[in-house]
Image (spheres, grey):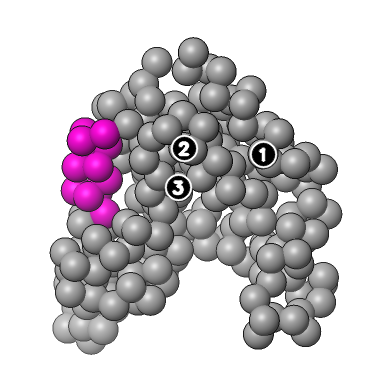
Amino acid sequence: MSRIITIGRQFGSGGRELGRRLAQELKIEYYDREILGRIAEDTALAEEYIQNVLERQPHNLLPITVGRSFAYVENYAFQQAQSVYQSQTRILRELAEKTDCVIIGRCADYILRELKPLRIFVYADDESRVRRCMEHRREDEAAVTEKQMLRRIRSMDKERTRYYDFYTGLKWGDKNNYDLCVNTSGKVIKELVPAIAKLFD
């Protein structure tokens, strides 16, 4: 089995932690936010801007306005988004061809499909996701309520869905697009990792 592993995940499901621990268990490379730095170097765009682009679908008016002079701003934004996606595609392929690795998000399951990665999708119920997010709040988020956190979770999932569906033509989170779906509801992430790692024995 390929030791290239891609992990898609619902916001707050613990997918990032699962991926990091799995990479440690298998002693292979782990790529997540480091990819943003590589894309920034490649495109000369700020990492914060790139993160924003990678979480959102290109402008909703694009099909109507492309090719029209009054759509310059929308066209420019779309071109920037395309530039980021193309850079991301190139970088992900370079990383995966160079070494065994775990890659978090960024449509890696689709981009690397020719390399036959193990495609994992991590999900959980709302209660578990809210609890995880509340436990890992930053200092400036101390006043965020559980209700507000749930809204944020749903908003993030919506943005990821739009981005993934737009660039892949597939449905984000659809079990038919993954080799393994992991439900982390009420689970301790580190206790799940050894069982998944055994797939590579």
Residue 44 locus on image (x, y percent)? 17, 74
Gap between marks 3 and 1, in whole Å? Answer: 17 Å
Instruction: Provide the secondary structure element on which disc 2 rests.
Output: helix
Gap between marks 3 and 2, in whole Å? Answer: 11 Å
Q: Is 165 placed above or below 79 here?
A: above
Q: Residue at x 34, y 58 (%)?
A: 34
Looking at the rendered structure, the kind of residue marked 3 is: Ile
Residue 38 locus on image (x, y percent)? 24, 61
- Label whose residue precedes the other's in the sequence (3 or 1): 3
Instruction: Provide the secondary structure element on which disc 1 rests.
Output: helix
The answer to which quarter of the image holds residue 124 is top right
Looking at the rendered structure, the kind of residue marked 2 is: Ala
- Label whose residue precedes the other's in the sequence (3 or 2): 2
Residue 100 locus on image (x, y percent)? 32, 31
Taking depth in this image into account, of 28 and 176 the one nearest to the observer is: 28
Residue at which label 1 appears: 190
Residue 23's disc number: 2
Residue 180's disc number: none
Looking at the rendered structure, the kind of residue marked 1 is: Lys
Residue at which label 3 appears: 104
Instruction: Provide the secondary structure element on which disc 3 rests.
Output: strand
Query: Residues in magenta?
Result: 88-99
Does residue 150 appear anywhere in the picture? no
